Amino acid sequence: MFRTGLQTPSGNRNRGCKPRPAIEIGVTNPVRQSETPSGNRQSNVSGSAICFRRNKEENMDNILEKQKVLIVDDEPANIRILIETLDGEYKLIGATSGAEAIECATSADPPDLILLDIIMSNMDGYEVCKRLKADKRTRDIPVIFITVMGEEINETKGFELGAVDYITKPINPVTVNARVQTHLELKRHRDRLERTLHERTRKLSTSTKRLREVSHERMLVEEERKRLITAIEQAAEVFIITEPDGTILYANPVFEKQTGYSREESLGKNMRILKSREHEEGREEDETDLYRKIWETVRHGNTWRGMFTNKQKDGSLYKAETAISPIFDNAGRVVNL
C-alpha cells in the first residue's frame, strides 16, 4: 500500500421389573418356590408377581443381550405357558395385574414388547394399553393382545388403541414365537432408525450453530472492512493499492485532488504515470537502483519511506512524503503494495 501526503506538517429410584443378577427373570416380589423335575426353579404364586429362575450356570452376558418381554395375565398359569413357549430366546417377566404391568413398563428397565391379556379383573387389557399409549415413556413399546379363541373381541378397538397384533389361546408356540420375533425385530429396526435420526439431528444442530457463528464472524469482518474503507476514503492522505508491478488497483479521493487524475482513469494504469524522473530536491538518480532498494525493503516485510517528486496530470511537479508497505498472502508472498 502506498500512502503519500503533501509536505505539510439427588432423585427417586424406580421400582419394579429389573431382573436380579445372573439367574432371575421376573418381578422381585416374595414368592414361594419349589423344585421342578427339570432342575429349574418355578414359583408358586404368592401375591401378584411371577418369577422365573434359570439354572445358575447360564451366562449372565447372554441374558443381558436378550430383548425383554413383559407377559401380563391375571392367571399365573397362562403366564407360565408363555414363559415355557418363549424361554431361552428373551428376558421374560410377568405381571398379574394391569397396575403392575404399568409399573413394570415405566420402570428404569422397561420391556421391549408386551404380551397383554384383554380379559382381566380390575383393569382390562384395553385400559392398560390406553394408559401405556398415553404415556410418552411407554407409547413406543409394541403391545400384542392375547385373547381366547371364540371370545368376542373388538379388534378394531385394539388396533385403534395402538396394539400391533393379536394372539389367541390356546397358544400355538410357532405362532407366538413368530409374531414376537417379528415385532421385536421391527422395534429394533425402528429404534435404530430413531438413533440415526437423533444423531443426524444433533449433527445438523451443531452445523447450524457453527453456520450461525461463521455468519456472525463474517458480519463482524464485513463491518470492520467497511470501517476500514470509510477511514481510507475519508483520509487526508493519498492511499494507493497496486500490484507488485505497480499497476494501480485502488486510489482514494485525495489521489484525484493531488494528482489531477480521476480514480476511474487511473485504475489499471501503472504508477509510472506519476514519475517525474526526479528524486530528492531534483537530483536525478538511477531508477533501477532506486526501485531495487524499495523492492528489497518491502519484500522483507518492511515499509519503505522517502520523498518523491511526482508529476501531476497537467505536468506540474509536487513533492510527497511516501510510505510503501507490502501486503502478503497466506503463503508469505507479496501480492500488493
Image: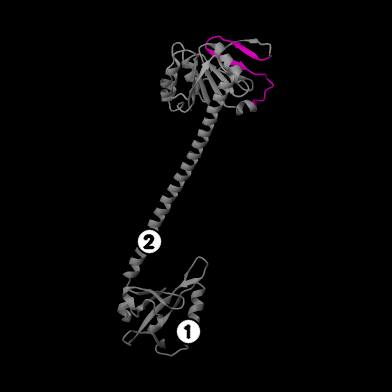
Per the image, label 1 sits on a secondary structure element best described as: helix
Viewer-closest of 309 and 176: 176
Q: Is residue 53 left or right of residue 11?
A: right
Q: Which residues are magenta?
A: 39-60
Residue 224's label in the rendered image is 2
Using the rendered image of the protein, determine whether residue 9 is visible from the camera's viewpoint.
no
Using the rendered image of the protein, determine whether residue 128 is visible from the camera's viewpoint.
yes
Residue, far front:
150
Viewer-closest of 66 and 269: 66
Q: Is residue 193 above or below residue 65?
A: below
Quadrant in which the N terminus is drawn: bottom left
Pointer 1: what residue?
290
The quadrant where residue 88 appears? top right
* Residue 54 forms part of the magenta stretch: yes
Quadrant in which the C terminus is drawn: bottom left
- The residue at 40%/80% (across/down) is 271
Residue 252's label in the rendered image is none
Location of residue 113 in the rendering, given as x and y in whole percent from the top left corner: 52, 24
**Inter-mark Cα distance, 1 to 2:** 36 Å
